[in-house]
């Protein structure tokens, strides 16, 4: 399976999302957990990605049925559900993504009904990606049970929270201990035929994540890329003027 790369959208602006959507990523994720877009801005953000021809995912704020269903109704290609630490929690996330009999999602295809062809529950189930995030020691211990939950599309590793849980330090996201834990998660995904995804934390990091067995990588967040580029421009300009 070829590795896909994604952009992560923190900035609550249709234009900023469009910049990300047209940048060359295979997909983008609107982050409503730590990003600044809220429920009211979700459809606009997803419109911006659709206009850019870029598949749009949503990281929901929590593993909450209504929030997951809302993101999918709003047109998300799939949801990324944070802080899932048990098979029961993964089952609940899947149930929120799938219509009966596979799950408990309520029928309300407010955007899908705008398509020329009538949406059907089976078709929408098939389209909706359901990723759960493993981000702590409990989730790591339960990885085999989580990875075997029926209907799950993949597991998404949040390395900063995982490092915070394992080592008490979110800045150890790239440390060997975090990468070893992540590789265990990728193995469980491979054994169950589901996608191993992760937040790579920078373009220079994607190679090691790919080597660890991940095939879907969020490269970085718009806020971080803007911050790095702006700081670099200011410091280069100051250096030029001072020389
Ligand atoms: C993490 O690294 O914990 C994440 O959730 C990435 O956004
Ligand atoms: Mg996290």
Image (tube, grey):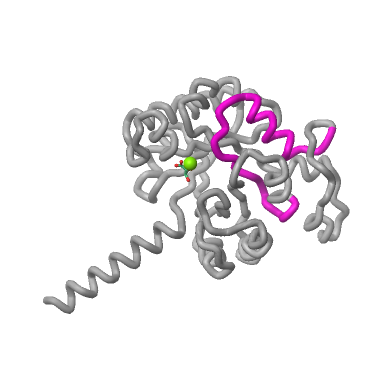
Residue furthest right in the image: 118
Place of residue 126 in the rendered image (x, y in percent of width and height, measured from the top left): 75, 40
Q: Is 131 part of what is drawn in magenta?
A: no
Please report the residue visible at 69 percent of the width from the left and 32 percent of the height from the top. 92
In the image, is residue 145 above or below residue 124?
A: above
Looking at the picture, tell me which residue is in the foreground, 20 or 87.
87
Quadrant placement of the N terminus: top right
When asked about the image quadrant of residue 225, the answer is bottom left
Residue extent of the magenta highlight: 73-100
Name the outermost residue toward the left: 243
Closer-to-camera residue (104/232) = 104
Viewer can see residue 27? no
Q: Does residue 137 sit above or below 205 in this rendering?
A: above
Q: Which image quarter holds the C terminus?
A: bottom left
- Residue 91 lies within the magenta run: yes
The reply to whether residue 37 is visible in this rendering is yes
Q: Is residue 241 above or below residue 186?
A: below
Going 55% across and 28% down the picture, which residue do you hit? 85
Q: Is residue 112 left or right of residue 43?
A: right
Q: Position of residue 226 (x, y in %)?
A: 40, 63
Which residue is pictured at 53% across the width and 58% down the height?
Answer: 36
Residue at 64% across, 30% down: 90
Q: Quadrant of residue 86?
A: top right
Q: Position of residue 42 (x, y in %)?
A: 65, 59
Residue 154 rendering spot, x and y as whole percentages: 60, 35
């Amino acid at each position: 399976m070829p590795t896909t790369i994604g952009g992560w959208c923190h900035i609550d602006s249709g234009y900023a999302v469009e910049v990300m959507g047209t940048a060359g990523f295979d997909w983008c994720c609107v982050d409503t957990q730590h990003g600044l877009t809220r429920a009211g801005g979700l459809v606009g953000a997803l419109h911006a990605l659709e206009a850019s021809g870029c598949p749009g995912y949503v990281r929901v704020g929590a593993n909450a049925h209504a929030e997951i269903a809302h993101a999918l109704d709003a047109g998300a290609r799939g949801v990324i559900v944070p802080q899932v630490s048990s098979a029961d929690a993964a089952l609940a996330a899947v149930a929120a993504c799938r219509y009966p009999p596979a799950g408990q999602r309520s029928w309300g295809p407010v955007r899908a009904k705008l398509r020329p062809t009538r949406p059907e529950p089976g078709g929408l189930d098939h389209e909706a990606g359901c990723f759960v995030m493993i981000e702590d020691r409990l989730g790591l211990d339960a990885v085999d049970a989580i990875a075997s939950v029926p209907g799950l599309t993949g597991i998404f590793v949040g390395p900063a929270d995982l490092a915070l849980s394992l080592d008490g330090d979110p800045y150890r996201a790239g440390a060997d201990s975090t990468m070893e834990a992540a590789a265990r998660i990728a193995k469980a995904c491979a054994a169950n035929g589901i996608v191993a995804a992760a937040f790579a934390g920078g373009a220079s990091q994607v190679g090691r994540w790919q080597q660890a067995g991940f095939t879907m990588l969020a490269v970085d967040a718009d806020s971080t890329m803007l911050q790095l580029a702006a700081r670099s421009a200011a410091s280069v300009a100051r250096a030029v003027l001072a020389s």
